[in-house]
Image (tube, grey):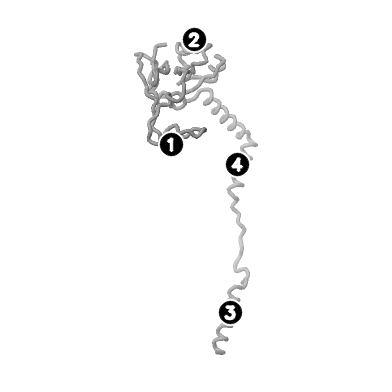
């Protein structure tokens, strides 16, 4: 019995010794490498002092404004050489149930619906190249005083023309609309034709 007690005391003491602060063993060295934040901050201060930071900010501002004023042109769109027209079915197949704000169901998943059956379309779309003088003049003559025509550029200075024409112009960003409609030549018109859209690639 006493042997068991002595053994337990011995184990306890050895654990306490193991847990003691044994102090410093060998020389200590401070961490001399600066933090990443300090390195970045120092580099930015150097850029500010040299005026480089202000120059970079101005370049970024100019590039951003340039893209706003003249977005990336739509690729693979040419000037109309052979006029053509066709009817386009805008029907879509629903990927999920569509419920209107008033609680009515517009359509169920997998159902094919035609948006023209539910939305009156009285406006027309007019696609043109804003860098082409003939197309620009043609589009302006058509849209002048007619708010039901939406002029859409595939290329050109959309902001400058909006100011010049004193009305809102749009840009087919990434060619989303022309690709959807299959338009490859401009100028082109899109109007409603019953439950379809009539698409016409015309000469300016």
Residue depicted at 61% across the width and 63% down the height? 28
Give the percent coordinates (x, y) of residue 172. 46, 24
- Classify 45 as above or below 178: below
Closer mark to the observer between disc 2 and disc 4: 2
- Classify 57 as above or below 17: above
- Local crowd size for mark 2, using a 10 Å CA cut-off: few (<14), some (14–19), many (≥20): few
Q: Secondary structure at mark 4?
A: helix
Labels 1 and 2 touching (C-beta < 8 A): no
CA gap between label 2 and label 3 equals 99 Å
Labels 1 and 3 touching (C-beta < 8 A): no
Q: Earlier in the sequence, mark 1 or mark 2?
A: 1
Q: Earlier in the sequence, mark 1 or mark 3?
A: 3
Residue that carries the numbered disc 2 in the rendered image: 141
The quarter of the rendered structure image containing the N terminus is: bottom right
Asked whether, in this view, residue 117 is left or right of residue 167, the answer is left
Residue that carries the numbered disc 1 in the rendered image: 97
Q: Quadrant of residue 2?
A: bottom right
- Identify which residue, 62 or 183, lies in the foreground: 183
Closer mark to the observer between disc 4 and disc 1: 1
- Local crowd size for mark 3, using a 10 Å CA cut-off: few (<14), some (14–19), many (≥20): few
Q: Secondary structure at mark 1?
A: loop
The quarter of the rendered structure image containing the C terminus is: top left
Residue 43 — which label?
Answer: 4
Q: Secondary structure at mark 3?
A: helix
CA gap between label 4 and label 1 equals 54 Å
Labels 2 and 4 touching (C-beta < 8 A): no
Residue depicted at 59% across the width and 46% down the height? 39
């Amino acid at each position: 019995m006493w042997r068991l007690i002595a053994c337990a005391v011995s184990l306890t003491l050895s654990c306490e010794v193991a847990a003691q602060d044994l102090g410093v063993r060998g020389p200590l060295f401070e961490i001399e490498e600066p933090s990443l934040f300090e390195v970045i901050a120092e580099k930015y201060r150097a850029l500010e002092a040299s005026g480089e930071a202000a120059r970079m900010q101005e370049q970024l501002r100019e590039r951003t404004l340039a893209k706003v004023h003249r977005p990336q042109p739509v690729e693979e769109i040419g000037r109309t050489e052979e006029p053509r027209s066709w009817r386009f079915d805008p029907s879509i197949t629903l990927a999920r149930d569509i419920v209107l704000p008033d609680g009515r169901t517009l359509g169920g998943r997998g159902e094919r619906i035609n948006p023209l059956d539910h939305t009156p379309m009285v406006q027309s779309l007019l696609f043109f190249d804003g860098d082409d003088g003939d197309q620009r003049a043609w589009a302006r003559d058509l849209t002048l005083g007619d708010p039901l025509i939406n002029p859409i550029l595939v290329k050109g200075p959309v902001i400058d023309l909006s100011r010049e024409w004193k009305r809102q112009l749009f840009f087919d960003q990434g060619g989303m609309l022309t690709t959807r409609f299959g338009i490859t030549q401009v100028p082109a018109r899109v109007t409603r034709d019953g439950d379809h859209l009539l698409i016409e690639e015309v000469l300016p």
